[in-house]
Amino acid sequence: MAHNLNFNELTGKHSFFSVKEKAWHDLGQIVEGYPTSAEALKFAGLDYTVAKRKLFTFDNENEAANEDVEIKIPEIEVPNYFATIRTDNETVLGVVGKDYEVVQNIDAFSFFDAIVGGDGIQYETAGVLGKGERIFITAKLPNYIKVGNDDLIEQYLFLTTSHDGGGSITAAFTPVRIVCNNTLNAALQNHSNAFKIRHTANAKERLEEAHKLMGITNNLSIQLEGVFNQWAKIRITDPEVKKLIQMALVPNKEVLQNVQAGKDDELSTCFKNMTDAAFEYAMTNETQQLETTKGSLFGAYNAVTGYFQNVRIYKNEEAKLKSLLFGGTGQLRTQKAFQLCESFAKAEVMEFYN
């Protein structure tokens, strides 16, 4: 199952929903209007709870004395470790320590509702991966980043958490045209646009983190709006766009040296295909024909982010999420594109080409 979406045998549905847009791999539920958090929970198959249960092992002496007995009862409790169990179907999701606190799926939505008081937030997608060990939610905020007169960039919050002990609760701010966390870090300088919250944190601490995230989101919106409007006024030629794309997508120093030296014959076919696809997106995609993007530095940046979000082919949707949001290639390359655009905007031409 390449898509890795959970199939709920009790409901006969895949655990995913999307508003209006085509569902993940044509699976899951498409809904017309924005649901409430309670409705989204059900549409996405997230309406199950998780419990911590004690772990036991067998008594070797008892097992040896009862070799002919088919039914063997574990008698020794495993100290300090517990299994996390999905209570609707008794599926084991993982093994955790004694201090691990289960964050129920409904709590994840409550986290979002708390950020804006439940007023104006719009749940776009949510789903369950694997057997139920990982969930994700994306929600659109009511405000926009405005570039120029009519280019509006939507703002999203993305949250993912696991029930198998494999990671923290992660909540991040990401405009729809920006697909990586570190890109935004550059705009906010020493701050981060993402929060990682330990599963040992209590509800009050998580609520406090939610409000911190909202404060960061507001700061990012203001700063990015200023940066993007500046870039929209800076003109850039087609050859310069091609060069910027190449330098943003280089996988190693050897390729970078060939790009800087203009040795196109030394570049691999794979790299050429990738940069050509991103350049074609820059030149032909309808979002690149707006007044704010066509021939502008802002459009060059969008070409890189748009390539990774809309053009590049991924093994599956989980691989796409990892690439764009969790330290993968898409995240690193768009961060590089942001840095290159900053240098270009500062007229650091010599540094840009050398």
Image (cartoon, grey):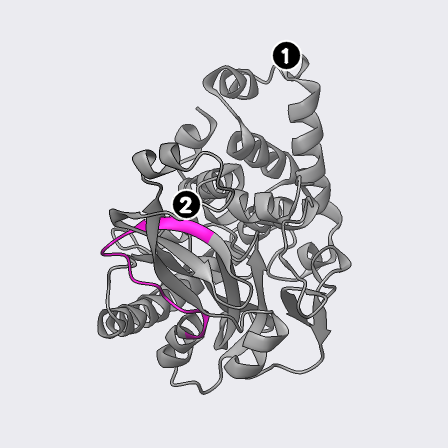
The answer, for residue 18, to whether it is visible in the render is yes
Per the image, label 1 sits on a secondary structure element best described as helix
Note whether 292 is above or below 268 in the view shown: below
The answer, for residue 160, to whether it is visible in the render is no
Residue 99 coordinates in the image, percent (x, y): 22, 56
**Residue 230, quarter of the rendered image:** bottom left
Note whether 354 is above or below 2 in the view shown: above
Q: Which numbered dot is residue 266?
A: 1
- Membership of 258 in magenta stretch: no
Quadrant containing the C terminus in the rendered view? top left
- Membership of 103 in magenta stretch: yes
Q: Residue furthest top?
A: 266
Residue 66 coordinates in the image, percent (x, y): 41, 37
What residue sits 69% from the left and 41% below the top?
313
What residue sits 66% from the left and 41% below the top?
314
Note whether 123 is above or below 94 in the view shown: below
Name the one closer to the observer, 175 or 84.
Answer: 84
Q: Amino acid at mark 1?
A: Glu
Name the one closer to the observer, 53 or 156.
Answer: 53
